[in-house]
Structure formats: structure tokens, C-alpha cells
Image (cartoon, rainbow, N blue to C red):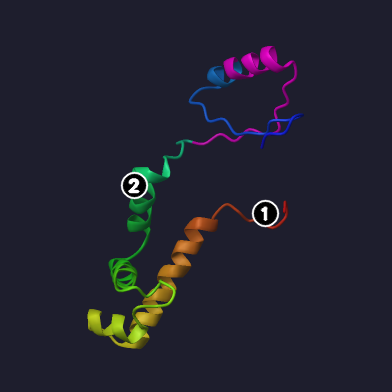
Amino acid sequence: MLTPECFNGVATVAEWDDFQRLADKLQEQFGEFELLSVNQVETTGAPLGSGQLGRVVRNELSQDQLNVLQTAHELGYFETPRRASADDIATELDIAQSTLSERLRLAENQLFDLIFSGDQDVNEGG
């Protein structure tokens, strides 16, 4: 966040010494520097376009869940308005509609677990 009085940002560095150099430059340039928090992680994130998200999802979901999601997506189930019904997808996959619904719900739940894991305080900060 940038305002005339404040810049609030996130920095990702490989080594603490790298951060120290960055902090020193910020303090030299702007006169004040306040570190609000530090998070240490084993690996840093990858840009969204890198394909990393897809690899994570493919590793976490079962093949049946992936097939249901991919087929539903390809047939237009998630579009507005829908181009395909649950029955259309079940027919395409040659499974019962109840099986499709169960796999779809499990896949969606697994995706939400991946997205929201570690965000237990998401509603606390506003």
C-alpha cells in the first residue's frame, strides 16, 4: 500500500543479509523504517504463470477428482450461464450423476482447503 505518508509492502529475500541491505537502503532513502513482521519459509512462492499452482493441485487431488474438474471445465459447467449440466458431465464420464456430484464436491473442498490453509485469521484483520 502506498500513501504520501507510508509505504506498506512485502519483501522476499533468500538470506537475512539481503534483507539487512534492503532495510539499510530504505532507511538511508526515507529516514525511517519499521519492520512489522518477519516470516521465514523453506521455499519461496513462484509466479502464478509458472505452472506451479497447477502442479500443486495435480499432486493433491485424486485422478478421479481431476477428471471431473477438467471435464466440467471443458464442457462449460462453471460458466455463466452453464453450457453443460451435471447430467451432461456424468454422461461424458460414463458415471452416475451421484458419483459425479460426490467427486465434484470432494475436489472443490480439497481446492478450498489448499487455498485457505494457513489463513485461520483471514476474518480477524478485515
Q: Nearer the viewer, mark 2 or mark 1?
A: 2
Mark 2, residue position: 51
Placement of 60 over or under 106, stated as above or below: above
> What is the spatial separation of the Cα atoms under label 2 and label 1, in whole angstroms?
28 Å
**Which residue sits at x=39%, y=50%?**
53
Q: Secondary structure at mark 1?
A: loop
Judge the density around disc 2: few (<14), some (14-19), many (≥20) Cα neighbours within 10 Å: few
Amino acid carrying mark 1 in the image: Asp
First in sequence: mark 2 vs mark 1? 2
Q: Which residues are magenta?
A: 21-41
- Report which quarter residue 31 is drawn in: top right
Label drawn at residue 4: none
- Most extreme residue toward the top, as rendered? 28
**Which residue sits at x=60%, y=53%?**
119
Label drawn at residue 121: 1
Q: Secondary structure at mark 2?
A: loop
Amino acid carrying mark 2 in the image: Gly
